[in-house]
Amino acid sequence: MTTTSTTTGRRTPPLLLAAGAVVALLALVPLGYVATYVVIIGSADLWHLLARPRIGELLRNTITLAAACMAATAALGVVLAVLVERTDLPGRRLWHGLLVAPLAVPAFVNGYAWVSLDRSVHGFGGAFGVVTLSYYPLVYLPVVAMLRRLDPALEESAWSLGHSRARTFRTVVLPQLRPALLGGALLVGLHLLAEFGALSLLRFPTFTTAIYDQYGSTFNGAAATAMAGVLVLLCLFLLLAELRLRGDRRYARVGRGAARASVPVELGPWRLPALAGLGVVVLLAIGVPAFSLVRWLAVGTSTEFPLADLTEALVATIVLALAGAVVTTFAAVPVVWLAVRHRGWASTLIERSTYVANALPGIVVGLALVVASLRLVPVVYQTAGLLVAAYAILFLPRAVVTVRAGLEQAPAVLDDVAHSLGVGPLATARRVTLPLIAPSLGAGAALVFLAISTELTATLMLSPIGTRTLATEFWSASSELRYGAAAPYALLLVLVSIPATVLLMRSDDPERVPA
Amino acid sequence: MSSLTITGVTKSFGTTRAVDGVTLVVPHGSFTTVLGPSGCGKTTLLRLIAGFLVPESGSIAFGDTVVAGDGVRSAPPQARRVGYVAQEGALFPHLDVAANIAFGLPKEARGTASGRDRVAEMLDLVELPADFRDRRPDELSGGQQQRVALARSLAPQPAVVLLDEPFSSLDASLRGSTSRAVRRALEATNTSALLVTHDQNEALSLADQVAVMRAGQLVQSAAPSEVYLSPSDPQVAEFVGRAVVLPGTAHEAHATCALGEVVLTEPATGAVSLMIRPEQVYVDLAHDEGVRGEVEEVSYYGHDCAVQVRLADGTSVLSRMSGVRHPAPGDVVHLRVTGLVRAYRPAGSA
């Protein structure tokens, strides 16, 4: 398995290719499991499992909720982004921070906050509201980034041609925002298909919650897997749409950042209504969860403060997240190295395989690893190793994106220069490449660490008996309606999410928004 | 420090022969430019010399040492002692100027007084102030980055320095000053250099020897003036500068064409193509001596101007003349050819 790049004439080291192939195979385990299982079940049984009113209801629920949330987050995201980026609204930087802040509250914590305050928040209406408030930043952020990098000269040209500001916005600005807007909305869709915790707490059944119930109550592998198959199809559909967009977006990118900012629109009499609208959004998205959390914290800790349990869960979470971050980042290195330094069909295939995980909900990865390990290697079932493998599969795309950005800062020509100066390959790696990619390795590991600390679904399914993490402890308390007991865990989960949110808020690159 | 000898070197990518049987000698201490349009294989040739690529056939030698071909196991780049200056410099972004320059020095020398002296010497050589040593690459202009890149490549005293379009990303004013500084530094250290470029002015003004490449092959290598005034074929003529190519009839040392009688560089007979440089076409504004024509167009550049003249027989001829006194469109002028003219067999004849 040796390919030679036609452009550089460099030979791909077979060991590197093998390492990349191993990572790609691991990333493909869940998809392979679903596909194999569907084939084994056979079309007759599959039809029998899927052609049920219950499945129809789940499909309707999942699709209507996804469509409604995508539309709502898209509208909300664009309006908020334009208000903050293109008007003379007072305190724009502060508003920007407040509007991104919901990313620091995991959706399941948000669901808990609402349902614990008011039991009537449930069903479609509750799920729609809570999920929209949790996910609109996924549209808001890329649209803001796009607005910042649009060349004002385009708008100025339109004005000079006699178009009004409103018309210019509609005919010049909006079409250019489309990729960011659609990309963000598709991400919302992918997140929503994978969402388990919030929808379970808000009692709105979708495929993801139904798979978990099926798995938990009856351990009915066939039914759960058949539903997982449908879910994966839905996700792949969104992923393909997103991939196509991403391709277009690169193509359509404008120059190297805009040097000048656009002249802000004067809101005039609309200033107060705009401020009020923003206030309501922030109040609902941040104020309510914060209030709820503080209230339950007071209630929960007034009786007892389980410091020992909290510490145990925190330590377990940190250890698992550290292990997962290190494994995932190391796994990303051969994939990225191949993709950047040794382009070719094999490298492309390997990189794409890891990207598929973007479409895999935690529930599918969890289910796949449970079944695959029981069937093939029962020893690893119920081990921390298996959980770490699940984390690696789930968060590999994040690590790959970050490490790739780093390796692209270390172009191959620097190796050439080092060699010409008499420095051998190993010393070049030590003196040139490693120092250059070290920051991105660190950043990738940090992102994965933070994502793992707040991961709920796969952790619930795969954590070894007796292992209690922040997410599992939160879940066992809140699903038993012990809201006070859940509060300290919820707070820690929010605190853990803050650094990643701050990183994202500072990022101006629409392609660095979480996948 | 030594000469560089390339003999019959060939390299293909897939079915394309990027470098096709190239033979070239860069004498010790001299400066050769390889000139060619993009995609002609000049960068591949440079990468073969540096050792980043291995030739399929032919050999490469530094002085008497064969580094590739001739049954010798191809030496890796780190064993060849070539200096390599990439496009846009390719300075190590995580190191300051001093560490960049010292990168190729032996481990013992880096960080010691002798290493520091060498860095200072190199900065002085490329005409940069000594206090630049602590700067980061992103604090340097494009021209300064290129100077540091050259200093870095010269610090370990390479056998030959290879420069891959080093000035192409610089703007016009920086390009001139930077290239002259590079030339002086190479001369001061008596280092052989090979520079690859698609810019005719750069190739002609810097080099002792210009090697013109086309579709993987070396079509002419000679002194700049010879390549300009006596190019090996009309295509080379048009690539290294503007040219007026006219049909004519040669009788030994002379030939006749639309511009009258001209003197040939070498005797010829029969039908020929004559290559005349625009600055060889003298435009007489005052006298009636020469071939009569009418000025069609004048492009005024200040230091000189280009005048397009239509002759009575319909031929259009370009002349380059001093900008001090020049004609206007519609003026009637008389043209004469000065200097020697190169004659070629017209295309299609043996």
Image: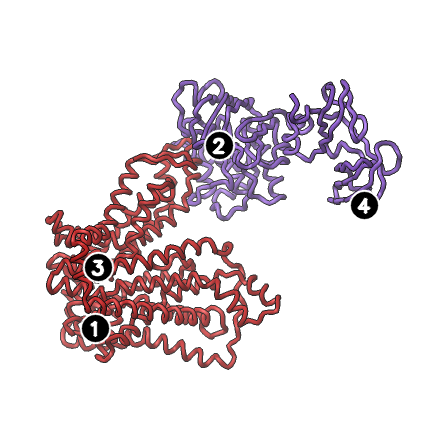
Chain colours: A red, B purple
Return the chain for callout 2.
B
| Quadrant showing the C terminus of chain A | bottom left
SS type, badge 4: loop
Which circle marks residue B44 in the picture? 2
On the picture, is A214 further left or further right than B288? left
Determine the CA span between mark 4 and mark 2. Answer: 47 Å
Determine the CA span between mark 4 and mark 1. Answer: 87 Å
The residue that mark 1 highlights is A203
- In the picture shown, does residue A189 fall above or below B202? below
Q: How crowded is mark 1: few (under 14 residues within 10 Å), some or many (20 or more)?
A: some
Q: Do labels 1 and 3 share a chain?
A: yes
The nearer-to-camera label among 4 and 2 is 4
The nearer-to-camera label among 1 and 3 is 3
Q: Do labels 4 and 3 share a chain?
A: no
On the picture, is A123 further left or further right than A187? left
Can the viewer see residue A474?
no
Return the chain for callout 4.
B
Determine the CA span between mark 4 and mark 3. Answer: 80 Å
Determine the CA span between mark 3 and mark 2. Answer: 52 Å
The nearer-to-camera label among 4 and 3 is 3
Q: What residue type is labelled 1?
A: Arg
The residue that mark 3 highlights is A228
